[in-house]
Image: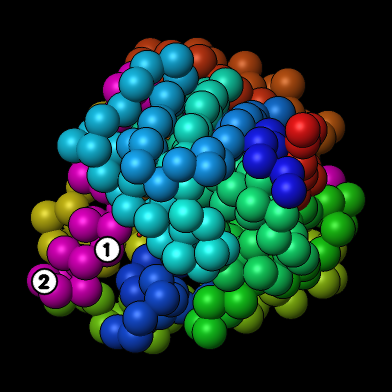
Amino acid sequence: MIREAVAIAHPNVALSKYWGKRDVPGNVPAVPSLSVTLGGLRTRTRVRWSDDPREPDRLMLNGRALDRTDGGRIYAFLDFLRRKLDVRGAADVETDNDFPTASGLASSASGFAALTLAAMHAAGAGTSWPRVADLARQGSVSAARSVLGGFVELDVAGAARPFAAADRLPLVVLVCVTAEGPKSIGSTDGMRITMDRSPYGRAWLETAPRIHAALCDGLVAGDFARVGELAEASAMAMHASAIAAGVTYWNGVTVEALAAVRALRTGGTPAYATIDAGPHVKVLAQPQDAARVRGVMEAIPGVRRIIEAHPGEGARVEGAT
Ligand code: DP6
């Protein structure tokens, strides 16, 4: 039996956002979403299953040991994987991101995708993508989308599927980093508070599927401007519902960056913004405009750096012994 495996996964950015869970077991989203998996940023995870069930699990994140207090969610997921994969031994996990962790750059998506795939391969379990995505989703909903490459749809049954190949829409994603360090409130808590307290929670749940359907049509038509407009509309509606519940991920630089993207459009450059559960602004641009858009975004005081990403591949096993 294979005991050890290494898997690579990339983060994804949702063009139509997931925000809110259905009241059913299994970490199932309340709204459909569509994402693009991002080459250029990656998580690499090694998992080794031991034969000895008495050993404790061991977890290293970016070279630092994580105990059960800091890594509780990941340890709980290892217990879940042991049950699902019928493994009895302890897990030894080392995972590294080449981008800031837990800061709204979707490290949980690539993290749970890589962990799930490596753990399944190391356990000798079948790694068909629907099953990998189904298990990864139970670590973090957006992780199901990082199992696949290109443009990926996740439906309200929790199933991920490939929607379009990476080259369907020539696209550059410029991640404008506006702060270092972890975000103030995790997305699981943020969406729960939104649904519990926001006067616009219901409005979001009603609007999101319509934005999603129109965005899918725009993508099929290869219409960059339509996809961009709807992606920005999805992010604004999601954040408006959250802000009304007191869940604010934005900082001042986020607002400045949004204004700069709108000014680019007024000046004739098609560029659109999306924001996840953090303060960074992800600008969607066409490849021929990327250098100009980057120059404008870099000049904003408070934008610390820009990470350039492109539609990329799904999760894959790098090596197994
Ligand atoms: C704003 O997938 O991190 O990035 O399922 O609770 O782990 P959990 O949430 P997570 O939420 C992602 C929210 C988002 C939008 C998106 O990626 O669709």
Q: Which residues are magenta?
A: 170-198
Mark yes or no: residue 1 visible: yes
187 in magenta: yes
Quick check: is the Cβ at mark 2 less than 8 Å away from ligand 1? no
Q: Nearer the viewer, residue 68 or 310?
A: 68
Q: Nearer the viewer, residue 254 or 18?
A: 18
Say which residue label 2 marks.
197
Q: Residue at x 51, y 27 (%)?
A: 94
Q: Secondary structure at mark 1?
A: helix
Whole-percent x and y of residue 27? 39, 71
Q: Nearer the viewer, residue 182 or 131?
A: 131
Whole-percent x and y of residue 14? 56, 56
Q: Is residue 5 left or right of residue 253?
A: right
Mark yes or no: residue 183 visible: no
Q: Residue at x 74, y 63 (%)?
A: 126
Q: Residue at x 66, y 41 (%)?
A: 3
Crowd class of label 2 (few under 14; some 14 to 19; many from 20; radius 10 Å): some
Quick check: is the Cβ at mark 1 less than 8 Å away from ligand 1? yes
Say which residue label 1 marks.
191
44 in magenta: no
The three-letter code of the residue at mark 1 reads: Met
Crowd class of label 1 (few under 14; some 14 to 19; many from 20; radius 10 Å): many
Q: Secondary structure at mark 2?
A: helix
Q: Mark 1 against mark 2, which lies toward the viewer?
A: 1
The three-letter code of the residue at mark 2 reads: Arg
Q: Is residue 94 left or right of residue 60?
A: right
- Say if 234 sits above or below 13 in the image: below
Quadrant for residue 144, please give it.
bottom right
Q: Residue at x 23, y 38 (%)?
A: 68
**Do the CB atoms of the residues marked 1 and 2 lie less than 8 Å apart?**
no
Task: Estimate the spatial distance between the alpha carbons at disc 1 and disc 2, rounded to whole Å.
Answer: 10 Å
Whole-percent x and y of residue 199? 15, 76
